[in-house]
Image (spheres, helix red, strand yellow):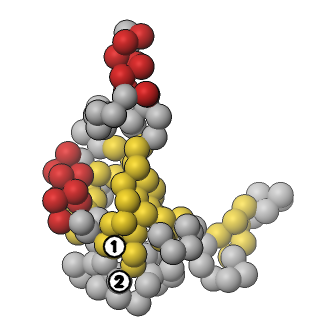
């Protein structure tokens, strides 16, 4: 990447998301009110376009190989408050208002990050059951 292009990406005002070789970009999703990380998912170009167009989070399911709008089957919609991009534009951050019962994880928890790694290498469940 030339210095000028690098400067444009890192310091410029043009939104130019960098998708990987599979056409995907990682997206970290947080709850706007609490800043709690809810989930990490991927978007392709269409998912990103639909998210921007509708104001609701859309993702690309790598396991199913299809576009999905969060909440279509669970009712746990994610209304986008803000969409941010990191310095080299290869990761996204969504801040959302969660609809439905407020849970984002397919396990029925508020967050997909409900376990922590102990010093001995074992996973333990969070005290708050996030």
Up-down relation of residue 27 to residue 81 (above or below): above
Report, in whole angstroms, how far the alpha carbon at label 1 lies from the one at label 2.
6 Å
Quarter of the figure with residue 13: top left
Up-down relation of residue 59 to residue 85 (above or below): below
Circle on res. 78: 1
Circle on res. 99: 2
Q: How many discs mark residues in the rendered view? A: 2
Q: Nearer the viewer, residue 117 or 75?
A: 75
Q: Residue at x 18, y 65 (%)?
A: 54
Could you tell whether 112 is left or right of 106 in the image? right
Other-residue count near label 1 (Cα within 10 Å), few / some / many at <14 / 14–19 / ≥20: many
Q: Residue at x 33, y 66 (%)?
A: 80
Q: Residue at x 37, y 28 (%)?
A: 12
Looking at the rendered structure, the secondary structure element under dot 2 is loop
User: x, y (%) of residue 28?
Assistant: 45, 56
Looking at the rendered structure, the secondary structure element under dot 1 is strand
User: x, y (%) of residue 58?
Assistant: 25, 62
Quadrant, the C terminus: bottom right
User: x, y (%) of residue 98?
Assistant: 39, 78
Q: Does residue 112 show up?
A: no
Could you tell whether 47 is left or right of 112 in the image? left
Circle on res. 120: none
Q: Nearer the viewer, residue 43 or 14?
A: 14
Q: Are marks 1 and 2 in contact (CB under 8 Å)?
A: yes
Could you tell whether 115 is left or right of 90 in the image? right
Mark with earlier residue (1, 2): 1
């Amino acid at each position: 990447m030339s210095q000028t292009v690098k400067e444009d990406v890192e310091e410029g005002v043009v939104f130019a998301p960098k998708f990987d070789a599979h056409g995907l970009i990682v997206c970290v999703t947080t709850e706007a009110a609490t800043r709690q990380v809810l989930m990490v998912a991927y978007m392709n170009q269409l998912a990103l376009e639909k998210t921007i167009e509708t104001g609701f989070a859309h993702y690309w399911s790598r396991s199913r190989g299809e576009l999905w709008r969060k909440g279509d089957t669970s009712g746990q919609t994610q209304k986008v408050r803000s969409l941010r991009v990191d310095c080299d534009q290869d990761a996204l951050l969504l801040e959302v208002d969660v609809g439905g019962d407020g849970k984002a994880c397919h396990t029925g928890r508020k967050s997909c990050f409900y376990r922590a790694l102990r010093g001995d290498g074992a996973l333990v469940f969070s005290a708050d059951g996030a």
